[in-house]
Image (cartoon, rainbow, N blue to C red):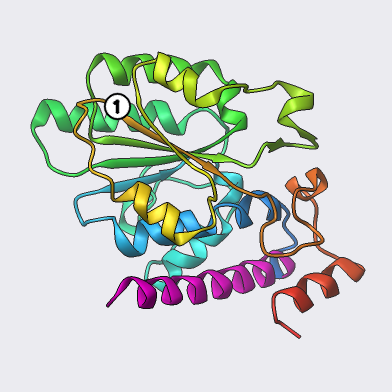
Amino acid sequence: MGNNSVHKYLVDKALKLRQDTFKAFIKHGEAHLGGSFSIIEILLALHEEVLTKEDKFILSKAHASFPYCIYLREKGFNTPISTHLEIDPENNIHCTTGSLGHGLPISVGMALARKIQNKPGNIYVMISDGECQEGTTWESLLIAARHKLDNLFLFIDYNKIQALSTLEEALPLDNLASKFKAFNWDTLEVTDGHSFDEILSALKKENTSLKPRVIIFNTVKGKGVKAFEGDPVWHARKIKGIEMEVGKKELGLT
């Protein structure tokens, strides 16, 4: 399958996953739409084009787990749809996440164990930009660099909104790429974290640095519904009333 065909296939899957996620939020009466919609292209590119059977993926920002759980169920797993993930390796959930700041430390341990045991496969972990304010994140960065964990890949969902404010208003993360470089990580940045061209180019770039790699994905919270995009209220807002109809229309559900 050529690049154009692959990307068209992924674009179609992204729309379908947004539609299914939107419907699931309505059905379950849950919130966290914004951060769920910002990671959909990254999830699909990784799982459809990169992950091997030896690799593991950890979703640390589990409040955005609805699209991931829906994707896994479509692949035949019996993963419960939830905003807090409970460890269940048989259904592709490799650690319990939900409380922010825990996914990366666990992933560092997994990657280090593989190095010690000389086992194949990479560990991929996605965290929120808000988790970059957690002390455990920076401790983990130091440990991973110290042990040259080039089998560890960290993804940042850099949508620049946390809870009900922007990062700039709450606790700015200025020069984020420079911070990771200073911690001795191989650092890439994707300008458009919703472009499959850019995402796949970064994901498939060989890591020859003998360092752990971080990819900073610049994303839009609420991506896919213009009325919701970039609005902090959609971090944890339930869908109802006129907003439900707006979302359905923009996602082609009406």
User: Mark 1: few, some, or many residues within 10 Å (few <14, many ≥20)?
Assistant: some
Give how far across and how far down residue 183 sits, in percent.
Answer: 39, 15
Query: Quick one: 182 or 254, which is closer to the camera?
Result: 182
Q: Secondary structure at mark 1?
A: helix
Give how far across and how far down residue 35 sits, in percent.
Answer: 64, 49
For residue 142, above or below residue 45 = above
Residue at 24 percent across and 48 percent down: it is: 55
Residue at 66 percent across and 58 percent down: it is: 223
Query: Quick one: 238 or 205, which is closer to the camera?
Result: 205
Q: Is residue 56 left or right of residue 172?
A: left
Q: What residue sits right under mark 1 in the picture?
A: 109
In this view of the protein, can residue 80 be seen by the observer?
Answer: no
Give how far across and how far down residue 157 sits, in percent.
Answer: 55, 42
In this view of the protein, can residue 180 be seen by the observer?
Answer: yes
The quarter holding residue 134 reads top right
Q: Which residues are magenta?
A: 1-26
The quarter holding residue 154 reads top left
Residue at 79 percent across and 25 percent down: it is: 169
Q: Residue furthest right?
A: 242
For residue 30, above or below residue 232 = below
The quarter holding residue 103 reads top left
| Residue 100 is inside the magenta segment | no
| Residue 3 is inside the magenta segment | yes
For residue 254, above or below residue 153 = below
